[in-house]
Image: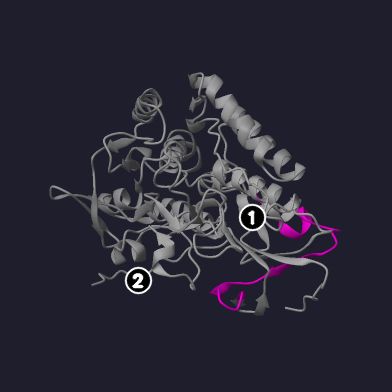
Protein backbone atom coordinates (compact mmCIF):
# COMPACT_ATOMS: atom_id res chain seq x y z
CA UNK A 1 0.00 0.00 0.00
CA UNK A 2 3.10 2.24 0.05
CA UNK A 3 2.53 3.40 3.62
CA UNK A 4 5.65 4.09 5.70
CA UNK A 5 6.16 2.58 9.15
CA UNK A 6 6.45 5.12 11.97
CA UNK A 7 8.26 3.65 14.97
CA UNK A 8 7.05 6.29 17.39
CA UNK A 9 3.41 6.20 16.35
CA UNK A 10 0.71 3.62 16.89
CA UNK A 11 -1.02 2.70 13.65
CA UNK A 12 -4.81 3.02 13.62
CA UNK A 13 -6.60 1.59 10.59
CA UNK A 14 -10.19 2.72 10.04
CA UNK A 15 -12.28 0.66 7.63
CA UNK A 16 -15.21 2.64 6.29
CA UNK A 17 -15.74 6.39 5.78
CA UNK A 18 -19.37 6.56 6.84
CA UNK A 19 -20.71 8.76 9.63
CA UNK A 20 -18.83 6.88 12.36
CA UNK A 21 -15.50 6.26 10.67
CA UNK A 22 -15.24 9.78 9.34
CA UNK A 23 -15.49 11.26 12.84
CA UNK A 24 -12.54 9.16 14.00
CA UNK A 25 -10.46 9.86 10.88
CA UNK A 26 -10.95 13.63 11.11
CA UNK A 27 -10.27 14.06 14.82
CA UNK A 28 -7.64 11.46 15.76
CA UNK A 29 -4.40 12.98 17.06
CA UNK A 30 -1.66 12.80 14.43
CA UNK A 31 1.15 13.29 16.98
CA UNK A 32 0.20 10.03 18.67
CA UNK A 33 -1.19 7.92 15.83
CA UNK A 34 -0.61 7.13 12.22
CA UNK A 35 -4.12 7.18 10.77
CA UNK A 36 -5.07 5.09 7.75
CA UNK A 37 -8.59 5.32 6.35
CA UNK A 38 -9.76 2.67 3.89
CA UNK A 39 -12.98 2.78 1.90
CA UNK A 40 -14.30 1.22 -1.30
CA UNK A 41 -15.36 4.70 -2.49
CA UNK A 42 -13.36 7.92 -2.57
CA UNK A 43 -16.32 9.87 -1.20
CA UNK A 44 -18.52 10.08 1.87
CA UNK A 45 -22.26 9.61 1.21
CA UNK A 46 -25.01 11.41 3.12
CA UNK A 47 -27.38 8.45 3.01
CA UNK A 48 -30.52 10.11 4.52
CA UNK A 49 -30.97 12.00 1.24
CA UNK A 50 -30.41 9.10 -1.16
CA UNK A 51 -34.15 8.96 -1.83
CA UNK A 52 -34.00 12.50 -3.25
CA UNK A 53 -31.34 11.42 -5.72
CA UNK A 54 -33.52 8.45 -6.67
CA UNK A 55 -36.54 10.68 -7.30
CA UNK A 56 -34.61 13.39 -9.19
CA UNK A 57 -34.72 15.94 -6.39
CA UNK A 58 -30.96 16.26 -5.99
CA UNK A 59 -27.89 15.46 -8.04
CA UNK A 60 -25.62 12.79 -6.50
CA UNK A 61 -22.68 15.17 -6.04
CA UNK A 62 -24.77 17.28 -3.66
CA UNK A 63 -24.92 14.45 -1.10
CA UNK A 64 -21.39 13.13 -1.67
CA UNK A 65 -18.09 14.70 -0.67
CA UNK A 66 -14.53 13.73 -1.52
CA UNK A 67 -12.78 12.03 1.38
CA UNK A 68 -9.43 13.53 0.37
CA UNK A 69 -11.04 16.96 0.36
CA UNK A 70 -12.56 16.44 3.82
CA UNK A 71 -9.21 15.40 5.31
CA UNK A 72 -6.41 17.19 3.50
CA UNK A 73 -2.97 18.64 4.24
CA UNK A 74 -2.75 16.46 7.33
CA UNK A 75 0.44 14.74 8.43
CA UNK A 76 0.46 11.06 9.34
CA UNK A 77 -2.81 10.50 7.52
CA UNK A 78 -3.28 8.17 4.56
CA UNK A 79 -6.34 7.28 2.54
CA UNK A 80 -6.50 4.19 0.36
CA UNK A 81 -9.25 3.26 -2.07
CA UNK A 82 -9.64 -0.46 -1.45
CA UNK A 83 -11.89 -3.36 -0.48
CA UNK A 84 -10.99 -5.15 2.73
CA UNK A 85 -11.95 -8.80 2.36
CA UNK A 86 -10.29 -10.46 5.38
CA UNK A 87 -8.99 -9.60 8.86
CA UNK A 88 -6.34 -11.83 10.43
CA UNK A 89 -6.97 -11.15 14.10
CA UNK A 90 -4.03 -13.27 15.27
CA UNK A 91 -1.44 -11.55 13.09
CA UNK A 92 -3.17 -8.13 13.43
CA UNK A 93 -3.25 -7.78 9.67
CA UNK A 94 -5.86 -6.79 7.08
CA UNK A 95 -6.06 -8.13 3.55
CA UNK A 96 -7.29 -5.92 0.72
CA UNK A 97 -7.42 -5.96 -3.06
CA UNK A 98 -4.50 -3.50 -3.20
CA UNK A 99 -2.24 -5.05 -0.57
CA UNK A 100 -2.02 -6.11 3.06
CA UNK A 101 -1.28 -4.05 6.14
CA UNK A 102 -0.51 -4.54 9.85
CA UNK A 103 -2.31 -2.56 12.52
CA UNK A 104 -1.91 -1.67 16.18
CA UNK A 105 -5.57 -0.68 16.48
CA UNK A 106 -8.38 -1.46 14.10
CA UNK A 107 -11.65 0.50 13.90
CA UNK A 108 -14.37 -1.23 11.89
CA UNK A 109 -17.05 1.15 10.63
CA UNK A 110 -18.19 -0.64 7.51
CA UNK A 111 -21.84 0.33 7.96
CA UNK A 112 -24.67 -1.81 6.67
CA UNK A 113 -25.96 -3.50 3.55
CA UNK A 114 -29.47 -4.31 2.32
CA UNK A 115 -31.11 -7.23 4.11
CA UNK A 116 -33.18 -9.42 1.79
CA UNK A 117 -33.86 -12.00 4.52
CA UNK A 118 -32.34 -14.77 2.37
CA UNK A 119 -34.92 -14.42 -0.41
CA UNK A 120 -32.91 -14.97 -3.60
CA UNK A 121 -35.68 -13.94 -5.98
CA UNK A 122 -36.21 -10.61 -4.22
CA UNK A 123 -32.47 -9.98 -4.10
CA UNK A 124 -32.21 -10.61 -7.82
CA UNK A 125 -35.24 -8.65 -9.04
CA UNK A 126 -35.90 -5.88 -6.48
CA UNK A 127 -34.06 -2.57 -6.39
CA UNK A 128 -32.17 -1.51 -3.25
CA UNK A 129 -31.25 2.04 -2.34
CA UNK A 130 -28.21 1.95 -0.07
CA UNK A 131 -25.64 3.73 -2.25
CA UNK A 132 -25.39 6.49 -4.82
CA UNK A 133 -25.04 4.07 -7.77
CA UNK A 134 -28.18 2.26 -6.60
CA UNK A 135 -30.07 5.55 -6.25
CA UNK A 136 -29.00 6.52 -9.78
CA UNK A 137 -30.18 3.13 -11.05
CA UNK A 138 -33.56 3.80 -9.48
CA UNK A 139 -33.75 7.30 -10.94
CA UNK A 140 -33.02 5.99 -14.42
CA UNK A 141 -35.52 3.16 -14.02
CA UNK A 142 -38.32 5.50 -12.97
CA UNK A 143 -37.77 7.84 -15.90
CA UNK A 144 -37.25 5.00 -18.39
CA UNK A 145 -40.51 3.40 -17.28
CA UNK A 146 -42.40 6.61 -17.96
CA UNK A 147 -40.89 6.70 -21.44
CA UNK A 148 -41.72 3.02 -22.00
CA UNK A 149 -45.29 3.56 -20.78
CA UNK A 150 -45.75 6.17 -23.49
CA UNK A 151 -44.88 3.57 -26.11
CA UNK A 152 -46.82 0.67 -24.59
CA UNK A 153 -49.92 -0.26 -26.59
CA UNK A 154 -51.76 -2.17 -23.89
CA UNK A 155 -53.22 -0.45 -20.84
CA UNK A 156 -52.11 -3.43 -18.74
CA UNK A 157 -48.48 -2.81 -19.69
CA UNK A 158 -48.76 0.91 -19.01
CA UNK A 159 -50.11 0.25 -15.53
CA UNK A 160 -47.43 -2.36 -14.75
CA UNK A 161 -44.66 0.05 -15.79
CA UNK A 162 -46.16 2.84 -13.70
CA UNK A 163 -46.82 0.82 -10.57
CA UNK A 164 -44.24 1.24 -7.81
CA UNK A 165 -44.14 -1.01 -4.76
CA UNK A 166 -42.01 0.08 -1.82
CA UNK A 167 -41.34 -2.63 0.75
CA UNK A 168 -40.59 -1.22 4.19
CA UNK A 169 -42.48 1.46 6.10
CA UNK A 170 -39.58 3.02 7.97
CA UNK A 171 -38.31 6.57 7.31
CA UNK A 172 -36.73 5.59 3.98
CA UNK A 173 -39.90 3.92 2.68
CA UNK A 174 -42.18 6.70 3.90
CA UNK A 175 -40.00 9.45 2.42
CA UNK A 176 -39.63 7.64 -0.88
CA UNK A 177 -43.39 7.01 -1.12
CA UNK A 178 -44.08 10.69 -0.48
CA UNK A 179 -41.58 11.78 -3.11
CA UNK A 180 -43.05 9.44 -5.74
CA UNK A 181 -46.56 10.62 -4.89
CA UNK A 182 -45.54 14.24 -5.44
CA UNK A 183 -43.91 13.25 -8.72
CA UNK A 184 -47.24 11.76 -9.81
CA UNK A 185 -49.11 14.90 -8.80
CA UNK A 186 -46.77 17.62 -10.09
CA UNK A 187 -44.32 16.13 -12.60
CA UNK A 188 -46.19 13.60 -14.74
CA UNK A 189 -48.96 16.02 -15.90
CA UNK A 190 -46.34 18.57 -17.02
CA UNK A 191 -43.57 16.37 -18.41
CA UNK A 192 -45.81 13.69 -19.90
CA UNK A 193 -49.08 15.40 -20.89
CA UNK A 194 -49.97 12.53 -23.24
CA UNK A 195 -49.60 9.96 -20.46
CA UNK A 196 -52.51 9.42 -18.08
CA UNK A 197 -50.96 10.02 -14.65
CA UNK A 198 -53.82 8.09 -13.02
CA UNK A 199 -52.12 4.91 -14.23
CA UNK A 200 -49.32 5.56 -11.75
CA UNK A 201 -49.89 3.68 -8.50
CA UNK A 202 -47.72 3.72 -5.39
CA UNK A 203 -47.95 0.94 -2.83
CA UNK A 204 -46.18 0.97 0.53
CA UNK A 205 -45.91 -2.43 2.22
CA UNK A 206 -45.13 -2.70 5.92
CA UNK A 207 -44.80 -5.96 7.89
CA UNK A 208 -45.74 -4.42 11.25
CA UNK A 209 -49.11 -2.94 12.33
CA UNK A 210 -48.00 0.66 11.71
CA UNK A 211 -45.53 2.86 9.86
CA UNK A 212 -42.37 4.34 11.40
CA UNK A 213 -41.88 1.72 14.10
CA UNK A 214 -39.08 3.70 15.72
CA UNK A 215 -41.20 6.80 16.20
CA UNK A 216 -44.24 7.67 18.31
CA UNK A 217 -47.73 6.43 17.56
CA UNK A 218 -48.89 9.98 16.87
CA UNK A 219 -46.16 10.51 14.25
CA UNK A 220 -46.92 7.15 12.66
CA UNK A 221 -50.60 8.01 12.38
CA UNK A 222 -49.81 11.43 10.91
CA UNK A 223 -47.49 9.89 8.32
CA UNK A 224 -50.20 7.37 7.42
CA UNK A 225 -52.75 10.16 7.01
CA UNK A 226 -50.44 12.31 4.88
CA UNK A 227 -49.50 9.46 2.56
CA UNK A 228 -53.13 8.45 2.16
CA UNK A 229 -54.01 12.03 1.20
CA UNK A 230 -51.27 11.86 -1.43
CA UNK A 231 -52.85 8.76 -2.92
CA UNK A 232 -50.43 6.13 -1.60
CA UNK A 233 -51.90 2.67 -0.96
CA UNK A 234 -50.62 1.47 2.42
CA UNK A 235 -50.56 -2.22 3.33
CA UNK A 236 -49.98 -2.91 7.04
CA UNK A 237 -49.32 -6.32 8.60
CA UNK A 238 -48.19 -7.31 5.14
CA UNK A 239 -45.38 -9.83 4.60
CA UNK A 240 -43.87 -10.20 1.15
CA UNK A 241 -43.46 -13.79 0.05
CA UNK A 242 -41.76 -13.50 -3.34
CA UNK A 243 -41.12 -11.38 -6.42
CA UNK A 244 -40.36 -12.72 -9.89
CA UNK A 245 -39.75 -9.45 -11.71
CA UNK A 246 -43.37 -8.91 -12.75
CA UNK A 247 -45.58 -10.01 -9.85
CA UNK A 248 -44.94 -9.45 -6.15
CA UNK A 249 -46.63 -12.09 -4.01
CA UNK A 250 -48.03 -11.19 -0.62
CA UNK A 251 -49.55 -13.27 2.16
CA UNK A 252 -53.17 -14.47 1.89
CA UNK A 253 -52.74 -15.14 -1.84
CA UNK A 254 -52.63 -11.47 -2.78
CA UNK A 255 -50.37 -10.04 -5.44
CA UNK A 256 -49.51 -6.83 -7.31
CA UNK A 257 -48.38 -6.65 -10.92
CA UNK A 258 -45.40 -4.33 -11.16
CA UNK A 259 -42.05 -3.91 -12.83
CA UNK A 260 -40.77 -1.82 -9.94
CA UNK A 261 -40.20 -3.19 -6.46
CA UNK A 262 -38.02 -0.98 -4.26
CA UNK A 263 -36.61 -2.80 -1.24
CA UNK A 264 -36.39 -0.65 1.91
CA UNK A 265 -37.34 -3.36 4.38
CA UNK A 266 -34.19 -3.47 6.44
CA UNK A 267 -30.42 -3.58 6.65
CA UNK A 268 -27.76 -5.76 8.24
CA UNK A 269 -24.19 -5.11 9.27
CA UNK A 270 -21.48 -5.33 6.62
CA UNK A 271 -19.27 -7.95 8.29
CA UNK A 272 -15.72 -8.61 7.08
CA UNK A 273 -14.51 -12.21 7.18
CA UNK A 274 -12.15 -13.16 10.00
CA UNK A 275 -14.40 -13.21 13.07
CA UNK A 276 -15.86 -16.20 14.87
CA UNK A 277 -19.60 -16.83 14.88
CA UNK A 278 -19.63 -16.11 18.62
CA UNK A 279 -18.43 -12.56 17.87
CA UNK A 280 -21.44 -11.82 15.67
CA UNK A 281 -25.08 -11.30 16.56
CA UNK A 282 -27.62 -10.82 13.76
CA UNK A 283 -24.87 -9.78 11.37
CA UNK A 284 -23.42 -7.18 13.73
CA UNK A 285 -20.18 -7.35 15.69
CA UNK A 286 -20.73 -7.65 19.42
CA UNK A 287 -18.98 -4.93 21.43
CA UNK A 288 -18.68 -4.06 25.09
CA UNK A 289 -19.57 -0.76 26.75
CA UNK A 290 -16.41 0.82 25.33
CA UNK A 291 -17.11 -0.26 21.74
CA UNK A 292 -14.38 -2.89 21.89
CA UNK A 293 -15.11 -6.20 20.24
CA UNK A 294 -15.72 -8.85 22.88
CA UNK A 295 -12.67 -10.96 21.98
CA UNK A 296 -10.01 -8.51 20.77
CA UNK A 297 -8.78 -5.57 22.82
CA UNK A 298 -7.27 -3.78 19.84
CA UNK A 299 -10.31 -4.04 17.55
CA UNK A 300 -13.28 -1.67 17.83
CA UNK A 301 -16.59 -1.59 15.95
CA UNK A 302 -18.76 1.50 15.60
CA UNK A 303 -21.85 2.51 13.68
CA UNK A 304 -24.29 0.14 12.02
CA UNK A 305 -21.89 -2.81 12.12
CA UNK A 306 -21.60 -2.77 15.94
CA UNK A 307 -24.02 -4.25 18.45
CA UNK A 308 -23.89 -3.28 22.12
CA UNK A 309 -26.36 -5.47 23.99
CA UNK A 310 -25.50 -4.18 27.46
CA UNK A 311 -27.70 -1.11 27.22
CA UNK A 312 -31.14 -1.79 28.73
CA UNK A 313 -32.75 0.81 26.50
CA UNK A 314 -31.40 -0.94 23.40
CA UNK A 315 -31.11 -4.66 24.17
CA UNK A 316 -30.66 -5.50 20.47
CA UNK A 317 -28.12 -2.79 19.80
CA UNK A 318 -28.45 0.89 18.99
CA UNK A 319 -30.54 2.03 16.01
CA UNK A 320 -28.75 1.62 12.68
CA UNK A 321 -28.97 5.33 11.88
CA UNK A 322 -26.61 8.29 11.62
CA UNK A 323 -26.95 9.80 15.15
CA UNK A 324 -25.65 6.75 17.09
CA UNK A 325 -22.84 6.32 14.54
CA UNK A 326 -21.69 9.92 14.92
CA UNK A 327 -21.84 9.76 18.71
CA UNK A 328 -19.92 6.49 18.78
CA UNK A 329 -17.25 7.92 16.49
CA UNK A 330 -16.83 10.99 18.73
CA UNK A 331 -16.75 8.83 21.87
CA UNK A 332 -14.09 6.52 20.49
CA UNK A 333 -11.83 9.26 19.17
CA UNK A 334 -11.99 11.04 22.53
CA UNK A 335 -10.79 7.89 24.29
CA UNK A 336 -7.97 7.45 21.79
CA UNK A 337 -6.87 11.07 21.95
CA UNK A 338 -6.71 10.97 25.75
CA UNK A 339 -4.74 7.71 25.54
CA UNK A 340 -7.27 5.98 27.77
CA UNK A 341 -6.85 2.63 26.03
CA UNK A 342 -3.05 2.66 26.41
CA UNK A 343 -2.73 3.72 30.03
CA UNK A 344 -5.31 1.42 31.66
CA UNK A 345 -7.32 4.40 32.86
CA UNK A 346 -10.90 4.06 33.92
CA UNK A 347 -13.06 4.58 30.89
CA UNK A 348 -16.63 5.78 31.03
CA UNK A 349 -19.02 3.55 29.07
CA UNK A 350 -20.62 4.81 25.89
CA UNK A 351 -24.12 6.21 26.44
CA UNK A 352 -26.25 7.09 23.45
CA UNK A 353 -28.20 10.32 23.76
CA UNK A 354 -31.34 10.15 21.66
CA UNK A 355 -32.10 13.72 20.62
CA UNK A 356 -35.08 12.66 18.52
CA UNK A 357 -36.08 11.31 15.15
CA UNK A 358 -37.87 12.69 12.11
CA UNK A 359 -39.25 11.86 8.70
CA UNK A 360 -40.62 13.94 5.84
CA UNK A 361 -43.65 12.89 3.82
CA UNK A 362 -43.53 15.62 1.20
CA UNK A 363 -43.95 19.32 0.65
CA UNK A 364 -44.80 21.05 3.97
CA UNK A 365 -45.33 17.64 5.58
CA UNK A 366 -43.04 16.03 8.16
CA UNK A 367 -43.08 14.54 11.65
CA UNK A 368 -40.53 15.10 14.41
CA UNK A 369 -40.24 13.31 17.73
CA UNK A 370 -38.19 14.98 20.44
CA UNK A 371 -37.97 14.05 24.10
CA UNK A 372 -39.92 17.14 25.10
CA UNK A 373 -42.26 17.71 22.15
CA UNK A 374 -43.73 16.14 19.01
CA UNK A 375 -44.22 18.24 15.91
CA UNK A 376 -45.92 17.78 12.57
CA UNK A 377 -46.69 19.71 9.43
CA UNK A 378 -44.87 22.80 8.16
CA UNK A 379 -42.81 23.48 11.30
CA UNK A 380 -41.60 19.88 11.42
CA UNK A 381 -40.76 20.09 7.71
CA UNK A 382 -38.65 23.22 8.23
CA UNK A 383 -36.81 21.55 11.11
CA UNK A 384 -36.23 18.45 8.98
CA UNK A 385 -34.75 20.60 6.19
CA UNK A 386 -32.54 22.57 8.57
CA UNK A 387 -31.16 19.46 10.29
CA UNK A 388 -30.38 17.68 7.02
CA UNK A 389 -28.92 20.79 5.43
CA UNK A 390 -26.69 21.41 8.45
CA UNK A 391 -25.54 17.77 8.47
CA UNK A 392 -24.37 17.76 4.85
CA UNK A 393 -20.58 17.81 4.48
CA UNK A 394 -19.14 20.82 2.70
CA UNK A 395 -20.42 24.34 1.97
CA UNK A 396 -20.91 23.57 -1.73
CA UNK A 397 -23.20 20.63 -0.97
CA UNK A 398 -25.24 22.73 1.44
CA UNK A 399 -25.58 25.53 -1.10
CA UNK A 400 -26.62 23.21 -3.96
CA UNK A 401 -29.15 21.33 -1.84
CA UNK A 402 -30.70 24.53 -0.49
CA UNK A 403 -30.91 26.08 -3.97
CA UNK A 404 -32.59 22.98 -5.39
CA UNK A 405 -35.08 22.85 -2.53
CA UNK A 406 -36.00 26.53 -2.94
CA UNK A 407 -36.53 26.15 -6.70
CA UNK A 408 -38.61 23.02 -6.25
CA UNK A 409 -40.71 24.65 -3.54
CA UNK A 410 -41.82 27.54 -5.74
CA UNK A 411 -41.89 25.84 -9.13
CA UNK A 412 -42.88 22.25 -8.29
CA UNK A 413 -40.08 21.28 -10.60
CA UNK A 414 -37.45 18.59 -10.13
CA UNK A 415 -34.92 19.78 -12.67
CA UNK A 416 -32.53 16.81 -12.60
CA UNK A 417 -34.78 14.30 -14.36
CA UNK A 418 -31.95 13.06 -16.56
CA UNK A 419 -31.23 9.55 -17.77
CA UNK A 420 -27.46 9.94 -17.77
CA UNK A 421 -26.74 6.29 -17.26
CA UNK A 422 -29.54 4.00 -18.54
CA UNK A 423 -30.54 1.16 -16.27
CA UNK A 424 -30.92 -2.28 -17.83
CA UNK A 425 -33.20 -4.72 -16.06
CA UNK A 426 -31.91 -8.12 -15.17
CA UNK A 427 -33.26 -10.79 -17.45
CA UNK A 428 -36.57 -12.10 -16.17
CA UNK A 429 -36.19 -15.47 -14.53
CA UNK A 430 -37.38 -17.32 -11.45
CA UNK A 431 -34.65 -18.45 -9.10
CA UNK A 432 -34.80 -21.61 -7.07
Kindly identify the residue that appears in the image at 50 percent across and 42 percent down: 191
Q: What colour scheme does the image use?
A: one colour
Q: Using the image, determine if residue 353 lies above or below residue 86.
A: above
Near-viewer residue (299 or 160)? 299
305 or 279, nearer to the observer: 279
Marked residue nearer the N-terminal end (2 or 1):
1
Q: Which residue is mark 1?
A: 21
Kindly state the secondary structure of the residue where label 1 is placed.
helix
Give the image location of residue 193, x and y in percent: 45, 40
State the mark number for residue 427. Answer: 2
Q: Residues within 10 Å of mark 1 (few under 14, many from 20)?
A: many
Label 2 Cα neighbours within 10 Å, binned few <14 / some 14-19 / many ≥20:
few
Asked whether residue 366 is in view, the answer is: no
Location of residue 290 in the rendering, given as x and y in whole percent from the top left corner: 57, 50
Q: Is residue 128 above or below residue 208?
A: below
Judged left or right of residue 18, residue 397 is right
Residue 21 in the image: state x and y as whole percent. Answer: 64, 55
The quarter in which the N terminus is drawn is bottom right
Magenta range: 64-93
Indicate whether residue 88 is drawn in magenta: yes
Q: Nearer the viewer, mark 2 or mark 1?
A: 1
Q: Within the image, what quadrant is residue 68 found in?
A: bottom right
Amino acid sequence: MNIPTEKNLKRVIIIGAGFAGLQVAKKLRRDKFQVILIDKNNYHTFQPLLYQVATAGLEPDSIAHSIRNIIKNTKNFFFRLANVYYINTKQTKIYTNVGNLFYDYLVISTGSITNYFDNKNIKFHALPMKSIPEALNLRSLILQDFESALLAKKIKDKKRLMTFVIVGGGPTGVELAGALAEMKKYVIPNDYPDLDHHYMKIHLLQASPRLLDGMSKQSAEQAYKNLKNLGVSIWLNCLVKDYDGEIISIEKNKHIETSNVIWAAGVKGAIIKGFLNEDIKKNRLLVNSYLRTIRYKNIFAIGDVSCMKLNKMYPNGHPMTAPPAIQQGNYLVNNFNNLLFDNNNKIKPFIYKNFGSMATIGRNKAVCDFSFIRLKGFIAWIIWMFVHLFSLVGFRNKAIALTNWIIQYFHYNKSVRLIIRPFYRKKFRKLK
